[in-house]
Amino acid sequence: MTRIDREAAPATAIAALPSVVALLVGRRGLAAGLAVLPAAIAAFFRDPDRTPDHRPAPVDDVLSPADGKVMYVGPGQDLVAPEGEWQQISIFLSAFDVHVNRAPYGGRVTAVDFRLGKWLAAYKHESAHLNERSDITVERVVDGQVRRVHFRQIVGLMARRVVTRVSVGDEIATGQRIGLMKFGSRMDVFVPRECALLVTAGDRVVAGETVIARWLATAPSVTS
């Protein structure tokens, strides 16, 4: 099932005004044409169901938090990754992708840090530390070991607002909806070195469906 996120209401209402005015003055053909705009705005906020909405994800899997194209896979980049030893996966969302974001890994939310910033194009390296963004850290204990995943919502040239719907102390599931970004943006996921990275730059990924990393305990062998 596909629903429309509640954030669509203000933008869709504003976009509908020209069509309403045209209808009121008797320009029915023009009104019908202008109605495409609010329909397109509403479609941007579409929120389709994904597998985690119906059954839990495997405990070792890290899922894509967003629909989009993988920009970078590898060691944590300078000025982008948090302090420590991390592996990084960066995903670019175009204006045509679903922009509802999901948790790449479940557990207890230990940190949420929102920062104001610029609106550089999201595919640029410097957007990760200069643009408006929201950083989220999740921890889960598995077999007595603490697993930690850090992920980041980043606005882009078109996206001008991050919406984060989780708070410190929340218990969230892998693939659970955690917010959205408006009109083209980027998400970074940071996993520890003991995870196997299962995507490469250029891959298309789907939020809540594509396994982008897996804890090595059950990671399959990867052949080139």
Image: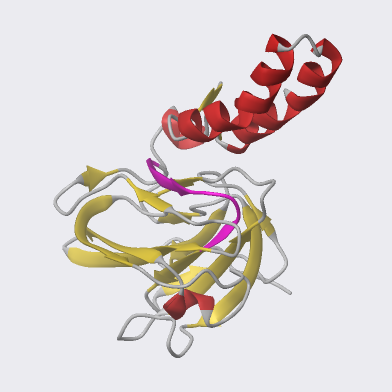
Nearer to the camera, 80 or 49: 80
194 versus 41 height, above or below: below
Residue farthest toward the front in the current orientation of the protein: 25
Nearer to the camera, 164 or 217: 164
Instruction: Name the side, left or right, on which 5 lies relative to 43.
Output: left
177 inside magenta stretch: yes
Residue drawn where x is 57% and y is 73% of the image = 120
Q: Could you tell me how many numbered marks the image carries?
A: 0
Nearer to the camera, 40 or 50: 40
3 versus 179 height, above or below: above
Instruction: Using the rendered image of the protein, determine whether residue 47 is visible from the camera's viewpoint.
Output: no
What residue range appears in magenta?
Answer: 176-186
Residue drawn where x is 39% and y is 56% of the image = 60
Can you give x and y, in whole percent of width and height, for residue 41 in the image? 62, 35
Instruction: Using the rendered image of the protein, determine whether residue 31 is visible from the camera's viewpoint.
Output: yes
**Type of colouring:** secondary structure
Which of the image's four quarters has the C terminus?
bottom right
Residue drawn where x is 61% and y is 32% of the image = 15
Can you give x and y, in whole percent of width and height, for residue 173 in the image? 32, 43
57 inside magenta stretch: no
Instruction: Name the side, left or right, on which 22 lies relative to 162.
Output: right
Can you give x and y, in whole percent of width and height, for residue 20 in the image? 65, 17
Can you give x and y, in whole percent of width and height, for residue 126 in the image? 53, 82
Instruction: Name the side, left or right, on which 147 lies relative to 67.
Output: left
Q: Main secondary structure of the magenta part?
A: strand
Instruction: Name the side, left or right, on which 172 lies relative to 59.
Output: left
Residue farthest toward the bottom in the current orientation of the protein: 78
Residue farthest toward the right in the current orientation of the protein: 29
Which of the image's four quarters has the N terminus?
top right
Instruction: Determine the image quadrant of residue 73.
Output: bottom right
